Image (cartoon, rainbow, N blue to C red):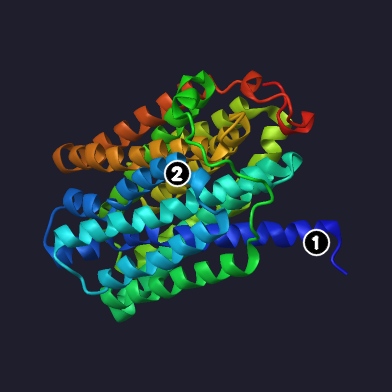
Amino acid sequence: MITPVSSRTIQWLIVAATAFLTLVDLFAAQAILPALAQAYAVSPAMMSFAVNASTIGMAIGGLSVSLLSRFISRRLGIIASLAALTVPTLLLALLPPLPLFTLLRLMQGLCMSAAFALTLAHLGEEADSKYTATAFAAYITGNVASNLLGRLLSAGVADHFGLATNFLVFAVLNLAGAALVWRTVSATRRTVVPTMPDLTRHLRNPALAAAFGTGFCILFAFIGTFSFVNFVLVRPPLSLGMMQVGLVYLVFLPAIFTTPLAGAAVRMTGTRPALTAGLALALCGLPLLILAHLTAVLAGMIMVSTGTFFAQAVATGFVSRAAATDKAGASGLYLASYFAGGLVGSVILGRLFDSFGWPACVAGIAAALLLATALGALLRPASIPSRLQPTEEMPA
């Protein structure tokens, strides 16, 4: 017999697996950035922009879903998005010219973002209010796993079988995601009224606007760290090979265990202390990234990844709880801002990396994390609707 506790564990695993299969394409290509830059004979910044063009699609998709989500069936929308994701992924296996490669990555982002935003909306609408933070932490944990296992898989497959085979493998994972949602996600219980959401209402909410800005800064910093550190790892004095770079991303493993604690941390301490703790950990790891010792760089990567994933889980859950109405619209705006931060980060930090080197890039990452910390101070529990359970958010 399945007890309530074991049933909740199964639900947690399903949510995490859905996130993994939804987002596995997003950052996996970062593990093979040096190989792609060599194959296309372009600079690190140019290849990084092409690979991270997926964040443009994620931002556009998030905003589109925020506008249209009330017309879209959560279940069918997620399934259709993940099934459509296989098309650009398969076309990437042809290693097309760089402009088309960039466009296909953008299309991948559109599909992933639609599935991502609709899933967040589904969780916000369907999860028991007492466990909303835990559900979002499960989804972000799946995101962490996609970053880790996706990079390992991408590096391993590309190293042994080539870049084209790499994209074929990920197309299969896209189909697996659509199948999982078809099998496990039920139609929403709530009746959704097909009226256009008032997105300006979310933007006028100071706490929500601060959360959107916080998300922007978090991915700005994350993209900057884990795009350009690859080039540091393959160059002297570290001089790692492609497969070794893939194994380096075991640094994400601690975050798989710490990110699920974000929901409990919010319930125990409040949003602001939990968010600040995650960002402070990431900031403390930055000085280690510029040292010429692999152990120090790995330790810094662990701290940055663990801290930013934890902060993302806190901020994502806050947005859903703070939105009194139209949770899908709020989640869509958050995702648009979050992934816009990734795009801006790849451009600005790429310029810093190419022109001034890795230390300047790390300084830009630090500035983004400090700004996120300042914005996080505005995430006040008073903005949470009173209908929430008392255990959901304690005074900070």
Discs 2, 1 touching: Cβ within 8 Å:
no
Q: Which residue is mark 1?
A: 6
27 versus 271 height, above or below = below
Q: CA distance from mark 2 to mark 1?
A: 35 Å
* Mark 2 Cα-neighbour bin, 10 Å: few <14, some 14–19, many ≥20: some
Could you tell me which quadrant the C terminus lies in?
top right
Q: Looking at numbered disc 2 in the image, what kind of residue is underneath it?
A: Leu
Q: Secondary structure at mark 2?
A: helix
Q: Which residue is mark 2?
A: 68
Residue found at x 55% / y 28%: 276
Residue found at x 72% / y 62%: 10
Quadrant of the rendered structure where residue 160 is?
bottom left
Q: Is residue 151 among the parts visible in the rendering?
A: yes
Residue found at x 69% / y 51%: 189
Residue 32: image x %, image y %?
A: 30, 63
Residue found at x 34% / y 59%: 108
Q: Looking at numbered disc 1 in the image, what kind of residue is underneath it?
A: Ser
Residue 253: image x %, image y %?
A: 54, 57
| Mark 2 or 1, closer to the camera | 2
Quadrant of the rendered structure where residue 394 is?
top right
Of residues 98 and 257, the one drawn nearer to the viewer in this rendering: 98
Question: Is residue 97 left or right of 392 when viewed as pictured?
Answer: left
Residue 75: image x %, image y %?
A: 57, 58
Upstream in the sequence, badge 2 or badge 1?
A: 1
Q: Secondary structure at mark 1?
A: helix
42 versus 2 height, above or below = above
